[in-house]
Structures are given as structure tokens and as C-alpha cells.
Amino acid sequence: MTTLLVPWLLFPVVLGLVALGCGFLVEWASGARLPGALLLPSGLALVVVLGLFTTALSQTAFLTIPVVLGAAVGGYVLAIGRPLGRDPAAAVAALATYAVYAAPVVLTGRATFTGYVKLDDTASFLGFTDQIMSHGRNLSSLAPSTFQQLQRLNIGEGYPVGTFVPLGIGSRLVGTDGLWLFQPLMAFFAATCALALFALLRGAVASAWLRAAIAFVAGQAALLYAYSLWGGIKEIAAAAFIGLAAAVVPIRRDELARWRELIPFAAAAAATLGVLSVSGGLWIGLLALPALVLILLSPGRLWRPALIGVAVIALLSIPSLVIAKQFLHYSNSNLFTPSERLGNLIRGLRFQQIAGIWLTGDFRRDPTDYTVTAVLIGVAAAAAIGGTIWAARRGAWRIPLVAGSCALAAAILLVESSPPFGKARSSPWLVGKALAEGSPFVVLLALTGAAALLQSRRQIEGIVLGGAIALGVLWSNVYGYSAVWIAPRAQLLELQQIGKLYAGDGPALMTEYQPYGVRHFLRNLQAEGASELRVRPVPLTDGSTLDPGSFADLDRFKYPDILLYRTYVLRTSGIESRPAAPYKLVWQGRYYDVWQRPAAGGPQVLVHVPLGQDQQPSATPSCSTVKGVADVAARDGAELAAAVTPNPIVVPLSAATFPPSWYRDVSQPETVTPTTDGTAVITVSVPATGDYSVWLGGFALRPARVAVDGHVVGTVGASGSLDPGIESPAGDVHLAKGTHVLAVSSGGSRWRPGATAPPYGLGPVVLAPSGGPSPVVYVKPADAAKLCGRSLDWLEVVKPAS
């Protein structure tokens, strides 16, 4: 549990103190007292705004932390003598919301994150954070790599990075890699949103503790919570700043009369634009409509402060406005192609999901019980109508204003995603984001309707109505919690360690699809993924390249092209071919091996002849093949090199005896998919006594225990590759020659995070002879006959270093 202290306790405290100090500065600048619940949200908005200015240029990126800390310290100094006041109810609402968003990770006992195999955007977000904190938006210093390609296609095209400024600042202040702070930052944004929701309820709900309860439930609206389980940090950040903007937007003439009082709204608006780019202007514009009406109805009186307020918003939004045209051009030309309109969605989301209730573990699909869900949404809709009437009577116009603005914004995007005429200017993917961002405010409005009954002395009706809405939201989130996919911390920690140890030893290659490696941890190795965002050619032997997100054995890559890479970062494996002769194993972990060749002056590979196939790295070459390679070596004054890699025992689990509820996947003939707790059992014949390493293929999302003859070898849990065709280590075992019983059990506690997540196939099981890296045998061309009849991984013609 000690690994949880820095990300989940120290980080939010540090970021909270910085944001609070900046909040005092915003309050001083406005010349008016801010509600206590809005100090931290306002300060966080200022952190984003200041960070966007400093990270706009490479020359000023290093000033980000000094500028933000200076603003925070200045805020505390200016707040000396200010009565702090106490609002325990608001604090409880924020902390409780933080705990709910933290639960899927904290309850695993590991500092990790959610949504690992659902969406790889988190890896990109980390790369953006690395870039802006080190070099701003300037890409000129980046060496050819997947990291360079990522930045060129995003930062270079005006991608908004406001969400990642607090991540970069917090990472450096607490000395922890941003990946382990990603989930805590999402929870921090959610807590910030809850504070804004609490403030919005002023005037509509008298009891502070009732406001806290409502803010707690609304802050975890089902669709927003579901997006957080996918790593949807931008949606949560946007909801927090939209809520802040709604809480401080001027809706009365006296609020428009003094331009300084518009500064908190200007900061919130600029932060929203920093998170969403120009599309954030839709929400800000809708929220500002009442103010515009007031200005039009008061000619000559409010124009001057309003124009100054607009100028302040424009001034604070300069970094976002500068890149706005670039981002719009990029979006219009790339984002809305037919193949990309859905993103990772299965279909467009239902508009009714904005109600914050959706009883299923996957928000992209229809609810498990559609009737119950529809009834609960209907109850919430009726309560929202009552909440609108109550809020209007109490003068609390901000609640229906923000809920209506968010619903209208989502509706506009929905219409624009499939217009009857003309080109689409939106997409189902953007509509889904808008629905998620707006859902907390719709739930807030609905619960305001329930609170109205409680405050009208209709206690039973209010409790029943509020309880039904809260039950719908919380029940939905229990579904999401049980279906969440948790990232493998131990595996990613190895990549973090490799990135530090071998920084500068590039270029590097990963044959596995692992975006967290090439987009983040290995960026200083000029790393490339063989199947994504390539700069250098990484062709296969047939001249093609890997499909996006796929994996290939080293021997499938074309020589000498693959020798361009000085360093290989490869998954440990029982069936992988050995790298070419010049490469030496320099680091070995449980999940990754690092191989390197000399930076210069090492042996040259003139010819590489792969011999194995499929899951058997070795084969026996014919003597004619050996002789032909030897003739080439003799002609070029070189040697023969051969890798002696023993073939493993590959056991297809599809041939095992397994529970009837499990099934075989025809697309992966050696796997079996466990849909319930149970065990697959199969008999395996071992040809020779010895020590074996045991590997399990597939993606063990639920813990999978491997046993031989009733003795547990080890457990594989949430450690598989993003490519399920790669096996993961289970443990080591000594086996005697003969028949053994192999068992693979899947299952675990039904209360743990991800207990009901959709399963992947498991298998095959690989038993590989233990030992160090495969030895390389060097033979003079005249002695090539010694290699005839031997089982070899590959043959090479190698010219020794001069």
C-alpha cells in the first residue's frame, strides 16, 4: 500500500495547495469574495491558463513551475488577513467524490490506472505532457521516433493540452512519473467538479449537507464515471471547468456592472478553451447568453464592462486562440473521415445517457435491463422539470442554465454529426464526449427537484425521488466498477526502468504493440513501435508492414533493415527468436529483455536465414542450405553464426477439458475463453527431464493460476500484452520426463475491480527449457558441415569487427 501514498495522498495535497493559492489570486484580482467552494476550482483554472502561456514556446517551458508556484505564493500573501471560513460539507463532497473515482485503482492495492486495453489515448496524453513540459509546442529538437510522430500528428496540428498542464506540474513537484498520477488527477478533477456543483446549488438548496450529498451523486453521473474508467481525463476536466464557469457566469445586471468581477468567469472560460480548444466556445457561449440579453436590454450601461470582460477572456485564451485555426483545419480534414467518426465506440451513444443513469458495464452498449433503466431515466427527467421550476422560483437560474446549455450543446453536435445536407462538422465520438461532460449537470438538476420536495415538507416523496435517482447513478457505477480493465503496473514499471537506464542508447525497437513504451517511457531511446507511428521503415520479409496494433517475431522482419536499431526492447518469451549475432542481452526482467549491439564498429550481418516457423523458433536446415550460406561466408571472408534455441512445448488450451460455459474462439484456435470461474485441464508429454519456464498466452484480465501435477507454478493477472498473441510468464518448474497434468484456473473475488470485465482468450501454455539467452555458435566456412542436422534458430553470415 505504500506505493499508493505519493500518487493518492501527496499529489492531491500538493496540487490542491497550489490551486488554492492561485484561487486566492483570482479572488484578489476580481475584487470580490468568492464562495469558499470555488477557490480551488478557480485556482486550478488559473494553473491551466498560466501553464498554457509558458508551454506555448520551448524557450519558456522551463518557467511553468516557477510561474505557477509564484502565482500560488502571491495568492497566499494577498490572502493574509482574509477570514478563511469553513465549509466542511463542501470538503466532504469533494473528498467523497475523489474516493469514488479512486476506488477502482486504490482497491487493487497498486498505483496504476484504468482502461488499459480499451483505449490507448492515455499513452498519447502522457507523451503530450512530456513534450509540453520539456519543449513546449516546438518539435524541432525531436529525433525520428514514434514519440516524434505522435507530437507531429497532434501537438503540431494544434491539439489542446490544457488538461495535461496540472499533470506535468504535479509530476515534477512530487517526483513521480506522470503515468502513476494520471488516475489521481482524474479523481482530482472530479472532486473539483463536485465543488462547482456544490456552489451551483446555493440559493436552491438550503442545507449545506444536502447540497454535499447532491453534489456527490451528480459528480459521478454514470456516463462521466464510465469515461473515467476509459481514461477520459479531458471529459472530467471539461466538466469541472464548465461547472466553474456556470457558477460564476454573470446572470444579473449588478454582476455585469464591474468588469473585475468577470475575471473568475474569464479564467474558467479560458481553461475550458484550453481543454477543449475552440469547441469549448460552444459551452461558454451558451452559458453567456443571459448576460448578452442583459447587455442588449441595457444600452449604454453595461457595454464598457462587458467589452473589457470579453477582452480579458481573449487575453487569457491567447494560447488557445493562436492554435485554433490550425486545430479546426486538422479536425475538418482528418477527424471526421468515415472510418474515424465512431472512434472506439460501437455505435453512437443514446442521447438519454445524458441523464447519468445507464445500467451496464459498457456504456457503448444498451443497458442490461433496458426497462428499469428507462423508468429511472424517466423519473430523473420528471425530477429535472420540477428542479427547473424550483430553481426559477428561488432565483437559482444557474442550475437550469448549465444543464440546458450542456443538453443543447450535445444536441447541436448530434445534429451536426449527421446533417441532412452538407459535410458533417461533428461526429458520434464528439457527441459522446459532450453527453459525458453534460451528464453531471442534468443529474444535478434532477436531484434539485427531489430536494425541492424535501424543502417543501414532502419528506417521503423527496426521499423516494432522490433515492431512485441516486440508486440509478450508483447502480450504474457498480456495473462500471466491476467491468473496469486495470493496467499491469509491474510490467509498465519495467519499461519505466529501461527508459531511465538506457536513455540515449537509441534508436530502439519494440516488436510488441506497447504505446506506453514508445510514446512515453522509451521516448529518450528514440523508440519506435513496429506496428504504429513509424518513421524508419520496419518491413517484414515479404515487404509489407505490420498491421496497426499487431506483433511479429523478430525473424519475420527484413534484414538488414531491422539492424538499423541499436537497441531492442522485447517481451520475454518462450517462443521468440533470438536477435541477430551482434546483439547481446544487457538487461533482463520478468516481462522485458533489452538487447543491444555496439554503437559502432561491431560485427556486420551480411546474410540472415531464419529457420523456425509459427511458435517453434528452431528447425533443422538441410546440408545444402548450410553449404550455400557457407559459400557466401567464404566469398566475403566472413564466418557462419548459428543460434541454438531449443524448441518449447506448446500446449493448446482449446484441446483441454474445460467448463461448458467457456468457449473456443475460432479466430484463435489455440485459446479458450473463460466466461466464469473454472479450470481447464490437459495432459502434456515432456520429452526430457529438466527445468522449464511456464508461459501463458492470451490476456489474463482475471487472475489465471497455472498448476502442474497439482502444484501451483504461478499466477498471471492483468499482465498480458495489448496483443493477446504474446505470452506472459507464470513461473518455473522442474519436470521429469513423461506425462504431466497441466491445469489453468481462471477466477477470483467477485468484489474486486474488473471482476465481470469481458474476457479474452487464454492459451496456449508454453513450456520452454530454462536457461540463459540462446548461445551463438561461430563456425568457419570450411567447418560448416558441423551445423548439418542440428536444430537451429537461424543461420547468419557475420563479418567480424575490424
Image (spheres, rainbow, N blue to C red):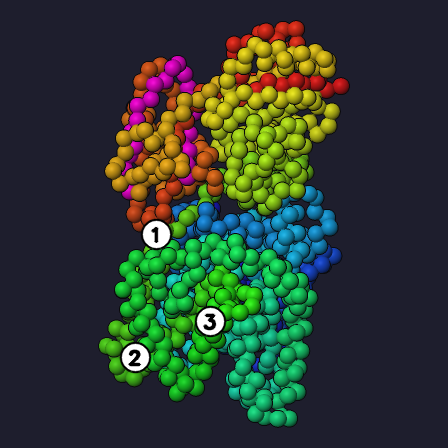
Between residues 367 and 197, which one lies in front from this camera angle? 367
Q: Residue furthest right?
A: 802
Relative vertical location of residue 771 with respect to residue 297 in this rendering, above or below: above
Does residue 369 show up?
yes
Q: Secondary structure at mark 3?
A: helix
Does residue 195 show up?
no
Which of disc 3 and disc 2 is earlier in sequence?
Answer: 3
Relative vertical location of residue 601 with respect to residue 333 in this rendering, above or below: above
Residue 627, percent from left and from top? 62, 10
Residue 267, percent from left and from top? 59, 72
Q: Residues within 10 Å of mark 2 (few under 14, many from 20)?
A: some
Residue that badge 1 annotates: 482
* Kind of residue at badge 1: Ser
Residue that badge 2 annotates: 454
Residue 693 among magenta residues? yes
**Cα distance in 3D space between marks 2 and 1:** 33 Å
Residue 477 located left or right of residue 597: left
Labels 2 and 1 touching (C-beta < 8 A) = no
Q: Secondary structure at mark 1?
A: helix
Residue 619, percent from left and from top? 50, 18
Between residues 357 and 164, which one lies in front from this camera angle? 357
Q: Residues within 10 Å of mark 3 (few under 14, many from 20)?
A: some
* Kind of residue at badge 3: Ala
Labels 2 and 3 touching (C-beta < 8 A) = no
Q: In the rendered image, which quarter contains the C terminus?
A: top right
Q: Residue at the location (34% across, 39% down)? A: 673
* Kind of residue at badge 2: Leu
